[in-house]
Protein backbone atom coordinates (compact mmCIF):
# COMPACT_ATOMS: atom_id res chain seq x y z
CA UNK A 1 0.00 0.00 0.00
CA UNK A 2 1.37 3.39 -0.99
CA UNK A 3 2.35 5.60 1.94
CA UNK A 4 0.79 9.10 2.08
CA UNK A 5 3.20 11.85 1.15
CA UNK A 6 4.30 14.48 3.62
CA UNK A 7 2.32 17.00 1.60
CA UNK A 8 -0.95 15.06 2.04
CA UNK A 9 -0.58 12.92 5.15
CA UNK A 10 -3.03 11.30 7.52
CA UNK A 11 -3.05 12.79 10.98
CA UNK A 12 -2.42 10.71 14.05
CA UNK A 13 -4.71 11.08 17.10
CA UNK A 14 -2.26 13.37 18.91
CA UNK A 15 -1.94 15.52 15.78
CA UNK A 16 -5.71 15.82 15.57
CA UNK A 17 -5.79 16.93 19.20
CA UNK A 18 -3.08 19.53 18.57
CA UNK A 19 -5.00 20.71 15.49
CA UNK A 20 -8.20 21.07 17.51
CA UNK A 21 -6.47 23.15 20.19
CA UNK A 22 -4.42 25.38 17.87
CA UNK A 23 -6.75 25.96 14.93
CA UNK A 24 -10.17 25.97 16.58
CA UNK A 25 -11.78 28.07 19.29
CA UNK A 26 -15.04 26.23 19.88
CA UNK A 27 -13.54 24.10 22.63
CA UNK A 28 -12.36 25.28 26.05
CA UNK A 29 -8.76 24.22 25.30
CA UNK A 30 -8.80 25.98 21.93
CA UNK A 31 -10.18 29.20 23.38
CA UNK A 32 -7.71 29.12 26.27
CA UNK A 33 -4.82 28.60 23.84
CA UNK A 34 -5.87 31.58 21.73
CA UNK A 35 -6.27 33.82 24.79
CA UNK A 36 -2.78 32.91 26.03
CA UNK A 37 -1.41 33.46 22.52
CA UNK A 38 -2.98 36.90 22.24
CA UNK A 39 -1.63 37.91 25.65
CA UNK A 40 1.85 36.78 24.57
CA UNK A 41 1.54 38.77 21.34
CA UNK A 42 0.48 41.91 23.20
CA UNK A 43 3.35 41.56 25.67
CA UNK A 44 5.91 40.96 22.91
CA UNK A 45 4.75 44.01 20.95
CA UNK A 46 4.81 46.10 24.15
CA UNK A 47 8.40 44.98 24.84
CA UNK A 48 9.54 46.10 21.38
CA UNK A 49 7.81 49.47 21.78
CA UNK A 50 9.21 50.15 25.25
CA UNK A 51 12.69 49.08 24.12
CA UNK A 52 12.60 51.78 21.45
CA UNK A 53 12.51 54.42 24.21
CA UNK A 54 16.21 55.35 24.71
CA UNK A 55 15.94 55.73 28.49
CA UNK A 56 14.56 52.20 28.93
CA UNK A 57 16.33 50.54 26.00
CA UNK A 58 19.79 51.35 27.33
CA UNK A 59 19.08 50.67 30.99
CA UNK A 60 17.25 47.34 30.56
CA UNK A 61 18.85 46.14 27.33
CA UNK A 62 19.73 42.68 28.64
CA UNK A 63 16.22 42.12 29.99
CA UNK A 64 14.63 43.12 26.68
CA UNK A 65 16.94 40.83 24.70
CA UNK A 66 16.16 37.84 26.90
CA UNK A 67 12.44 38.57 26.83
CA UNK A 68 12.46 38.92 23.05
CA UNK A 69 14.21 35.59 22.62
CA UNK A 70 11.73 33.94 25.00
CA UNK A 71 8.80 35.11 22.92
CA UNK A 72 10.55 34.20 19.68
CA UNK A 73 11.19 30.63 20.86
CA UNK A 74 7.58 30.26 22.02
CA UNK A 75 6.21 31.57 18.72
CA UNK A 76 8.63 29.33 16.80
CA UNK A 77 7.34 26.27 18.67
CA UNK A 78 3.77 27.36 17.96
CA UNK A 79 4.60 27.77 14.26
CA UNK A 80 6.09 24.26 14.12
CA UNK A 81 3.06 22.84 15.96
CA UNK A 82 0.74 24.37 13.37
CA UNK A 83 2.74 22.80 10.54
CA UNK A 84 2.79 19.28 11.99
CA UNK A 85 -0.92 19.30 12.87
CA UNK A 86 -2.28 19.81 9.38
CA UNK A 87 -2.51 17.39 6.46
CA UNK A 88 -1.10 19.78 3.90
CA UNK A 89 1.38 22.10 5.64
CA UNK A 90 2.02 24.01 2.42
CA UNK A 91 -1.52 25.44 2.59
CA UNK A 92 -0.88 26.94 6.01
CA UNK A 93 2.68 28.10 5.27
CA UNK A 94 1.55 30.23 2.30
CA UNK A 95 -1.73 31.39 3.84
CA UNK A 96 -2.12 34.92 5.23
CA UNK A 97 -1.73 33.85 8.84
CA UNK A 98 1.07 31.45 7.95
CA UNK A 99 3.11 34.26 6.38
CA UNK A 100 2.37 36.60 9.30
CA UNK A 101 3.40 33.91 11.80
CA UNK A 102 6.67 33.36 9.96
CA UNK A 103 7.43 37.06 9.62
CA UNK A 104 6.80 37.52 13.33
CA UNK A 105 9.73 35.27 14.28
CA UNK A 106 12.22 36.00 11.47
CA UNK A 107 13.39 39.48 12.67
CA UNK A 108 14.89 38.15 15.92
CA UNK A 109 16.88 35.47 14.09
CA UNK A 110 17.79 38.03 11.44
CA UNK A 111 19.32 40.18 14.16
CA UNK A 112 22.02 37.53 14.67
CA UNK A 113 23.37 38.16 11.18
CA UNK A 114 22.37 41.74 10.36
CA UNK A 115 23.32 44.71 12.50
CA UNK A 116 20.73 47.40 13.05
CA UNK A 117 17.16 47.65 14.25
CA UNK A 118 15.78 44.56 12.53
CA UNK A 119 14.29 43.47 15.84
CA UNK A 120 11.89 46.41 15.61
CA UNK A 121 10.20 44.59 12.75
CA UNK A 122 8.74 42.23 15.35
CA UNK A 123 5.88 44.71 15.78
CA UNK A 124 4.43 42.85 12.81
CA UNK A 125 3.23 40.46 15.49
CA UNK A 126 0.44 42.93 16.11
CA UNK A 127 -1.13 41.59 12.90
CA UNK A 128 -1.57 38.30 14.70
CA UNK A 129 -4.06 40.05 16.94
CA UNK A 130 -6.50 39.53 14.09
CA UNK A 131 -6.91 36.09 15.62
CA UNK A 132 -9.03 37.76 18.27
CA UNK A 133 -11.97 37.20 15.92
CA UNK A 134 -11.54 33.47 16.50
CA UNK A 135 -11.95 33.93 20.24
CA UNK A 136 -14.71 36.51 20.21
CA UNK A 137 -16.73 34.79 17.52
CA UNK A 138 -19.53 33.45 19.69
CA UNK A 139 -21.10 32.44 16.39
CA UNK A 140 -22.01 36.03 15.56
CA UNK A 141 -18.71 37.82 14.98
CA UNK A 142 -17.36 35.42 12.36
CA UNK A 143 -20.67 35.50 10.50
CA UNK A 144 -20.65 39.29 10.51
CA UNK A 145 -17.03 39.44 9.37
CA UNK A 146 -17.69 37.05 6.47
CA UNK A 147 -20.84 38.93 5.56
CA UNK A 148 -18.93 42.22 5.39
CA UNK A 149 -16.15 40.61 3.33
CA UNK A 150 -18.73 39.18 0.94
CA UNK A 151 -20.44 42.58 0.61
CA UNK A 152 -17.13 44.26 -0.21
CA UNK A 153 -16.36 41.57 -2.76
CA UNK A 154 -19.72 41.92 -4.52
CA UNK A 155 -19.54 45.72 -4.56
CA UNK A 156 -15.93 45.98 -5.75
CA UNK A 157 -16.87 46.79 -9.36
CA UNK A 158 -19.10 49.67 -8.25
CA UNK A 159 -16.46 50.95 -5.87
CA UNK A 160 -13.82 50.81 -8.63
CA UNK A 161 -16.07 52.86 -10.92
CA UNK A 162 -16.69 55.31 -8.05
CA UNK A 163 -12.97 55.67 -7.35
CA UNK A 164 -12.37 56.23 -11.05
CA UNK A 165 -14.91 59.05 -11.03
CA UNK A 166 -13.28 60.58 -7.94
CA UNK A 167 -9.84 60.35 -9.55
CA UNK A 168 -11.12 62.08 -12.68
CA UNK A 169 -12.75 64.78 -10.56
CA UNK A 170 -9.59 65.62 -8.59
CA UNK A 171 -7.56 65.77 -11.79
CA UNK A 172 -10.01 68.26 -13.31
CA UNK A 173 -10.31 70.29 -10.10
CA UNK A 174 -6.54 70.33 -9.64
CA UNK A 175 -6.03 71.55 -13.19
CA UNK A 176 -8.67 74.28 -12.80
CA UNK A 177 -7.10 75.50 -9.55
CA UNK A 178 -3.68 75.56 -11.21
CA UNK A 179 -5.10 77.90 -13.86
CA UNK A 180 -7.07 80.04 -11.38
CA UNK A 181 -4.48 80.46 -8.61
CA UNK A 182 -0.93 81.77 -8.71
CA UNK A 183 2.31 80.01 -7.69
CA UNK A 184 2.52 82.36 -4.71
CA UNK A 185 -0.53 80.60 -3.26
CA UNK A 186 1.23 77.25 -3.43
CA UNK A 187 -0.28 75.96 -6.67
CA UNK A 188 3.08 75.63 -8.41
CA UNK A 189 2.18 72.66 -10.63
CA UNK A 190 -0.77 70.52 -11.66
CA UNK A 191 0.31 67.52 -9.52
CA UNK A 192 0.57 69.79 -6.46
CA UNK A 193 -2.83 71.26 -7.29
CA UNK A 194 -4.25 67.74 -7.57
CA UNK A 195 -2.81 67.02 -4.12
CA UNK A 196 -4.75 70.04 -2.82
CA UNK A 197 -7.92 68.77 -4.48
CA UNK A 198 -7.54 65.34 -2.85
CA UNK A 199 -6.90 66.83 0.59
CA UNK A 200 -9.87 69.17 0.25
CA UNK A 201 -12.28 66.66 -1.28
CA UNK A 202 -11.60 64.15 1.51
CA UNK A 203 -12.21 66.96 4.06
CA UNK A 204 -8.75 66.42 5.56
CA UNK A 205 -7.70 70.03 5.05
CA UNK A 206 -4.03 70.21 6.00
CA UNK A 207 -3.91 73.92 5.19
CA UNK A 208 -0.43 73.84 3.67
CA UNK A 209 -1.93 75.01 0.36
CA UNK A 210 -5.01 77.20 0.13
CA UNK A 211 -6.53 79.51 -2.50
CA UNK A 212 -6.16 83.27 -2.15
CA UNK A 213 -8.44 84.56 -4.94
CA UNK A 214 -12.21 84.90 -4.63
CA UNK A 215 -12.81 82.48 -7.50
CA UNK A 216 -10.40 79.97 -6.01
CA UNK A 217 -12.11 80.15 -2.61
CA UNK A 218 -15.50 79.69 -4.27
CA UNK A 219 -14.27 76.56 -6.05
CA UNK A 220 -12.75 75.31 -2.79
CA UNK A 221 -16.11 75.74 -1.03
CA UNK A 222 -17.81 73.63 -3.73
CA UNK A 223 -15.13 70.95 -3.38
CA UNK A 224 -15.66 70.83 0.39
CA UNK A 225 -19.41 70.37 -0.05
CA UNK A 226 -18.79 67.64 -2.64
CA UNK A 227 -16.54 65.90 -0.11
CA UNK A 228 -19.39 65.22 2.28
CA UNK A 229 -21.49 63.70 -0.48
CA UNK A 230 -18.64 61.57 -1.81
CA UNK A 231 -17.91 60.03 1.59
CA UNK A 232 -21.47 58.68 1.76
CA UNK A 233 -21.39 56.95 -1.64
CA UNK A 234 -19.19 53.90 -0.86
CA UNK A 235 -21.03 53.47 2.44
CA UNK A 236 -24.33 53.27 0.57
CA UNK A 237 -22.92 50.78 -1.95
CA UNK A 238 -21.65 48.39 0.72
CA UNK A 239 -24.79 48.80 2.86
CA UNK A 240 -26.98 47.85 -0.10
CA UNK A 241 -24.96 44.67 -0.59
CA UNK A 242 -25.17 43.85 3.12
CA UNK A 243 -28.96 44.12 3.03
CA UNK A 244 -29.16 41.63 0.17
CA UNK A 245 -26.97 39.02 1.88
CA UNK A 246 -28.35 36.23 4.02
CA UNK A 247 -25.84 35.47 6.78
CA UNK A 248 -25.41 31.88 7.92
CA UNK A 249 -24.09 30.71 11.24
CA UNK A 250 -20.56 29.36 11.06
CA UNK A 251 -18.17 27.68 13.46
CA UNK A 252 -14.48 28.03 14.21
CA UNK A 253 -13.76 24.51 12.99
CA UNK A 254 -10.69 24.48 10.75
CA UNK A 255 -10.19 21.95 7.97
CA UNK A 256 -7.38 19.50 8.75
CA UNK A 257 -6.46 19.48 5.07
CA UNK A 258 -6.13 23.20 4.23
CA UNK A 259 -6.46 24.82 7.70
CA UNK A 260 -9.20 27.20 6.52
CA UNK A 261 -12.26 27.85 8.64
CA UNK A 262 -15.66 29.53 8.32
CA UNK A 263 -17.79 26.42 7.75
CA UNK A 264 -21.50 26.34 8.51
CA UNK A 265 -22.81 24.32 11.41
CA UNK A 266 -24.15 21.56 9.17
CA UNK A 267 -21.14 21.40 6.82
CA UNK A 268 -19.80 17.91 6.11
CA UNK A 269 -17.09 18.84 3.62
CA UNK A 270 -14.69 21.80 3.47
CA UNK A 271 -16.00 24.46 1.12
CA UNK A 272 -12.44 25.39 0.11
CA UNK A 273 -10.77 22.05 -0.68
CA UNK A 274 -13.59 19.48 -0.50
CA UNK A 275 -11.97 17.43 2.26
CA UNK A 276 -14.36 15.75 4.71
CA UNK A 277 -14.50 17.63 7.99
CA UNK A 278 -13.63 15.86 11.21
CA UNK A 279 -16.50 16.57 13.59
CA UNK A 280 -15.45 15.91 17.16
Image (spheres, grey):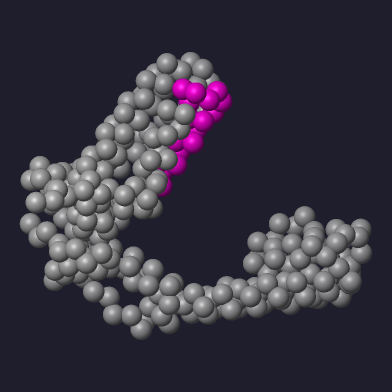
Q: For the C terminus, give its image quadrant.
A: bottom left
- At x 31% / y 35%, what residue is drawn? 75
Return the residue nearer the eye: 17 or 140. 17
Direction from residue 269 to residue 122 in the image, left or right: right
Determine if the magenta segment contains residue 139. no
> Residue 197 appears in which quarter of the rendering?
bottom right
Return the residue nearer the eye: 148 or 13. 13
- At x 45% / y 38%, what residue is drawn? 123
Q: In x, y percent, where is residue 216?
A: 84, 72
Q: In x, y percent, where is residue 114?
A: 53, 25
- At x 28% / y 80%, what residue is drawn? 246
> Residue 153 appears in which quarter of the rendering?
bottom left
Return the residue nearer the eye: 191 or 89. 89
Direction from residue 26 to residue 163 in the image, left or right: right
Q: Is residue 21 visible?
A: no
Would you place residue 17 above or below residue 73 in this image? below
Return the residue nearer the eye: 182 or 89. 89
Range of residues picked out in magenta: 111-131
Q: In x, y percent, where is residue 234?
A: 52, 75
Amino acid sequence: MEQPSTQNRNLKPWQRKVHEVIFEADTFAGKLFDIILLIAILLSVAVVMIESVPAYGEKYHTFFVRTEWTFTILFSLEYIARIISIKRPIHYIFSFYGIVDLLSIIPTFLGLFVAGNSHSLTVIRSLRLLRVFRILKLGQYLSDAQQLASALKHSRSKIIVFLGAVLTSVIILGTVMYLVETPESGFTSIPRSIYWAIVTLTTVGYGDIYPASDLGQFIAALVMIMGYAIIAVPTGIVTNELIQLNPRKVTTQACEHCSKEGHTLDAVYCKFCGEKLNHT
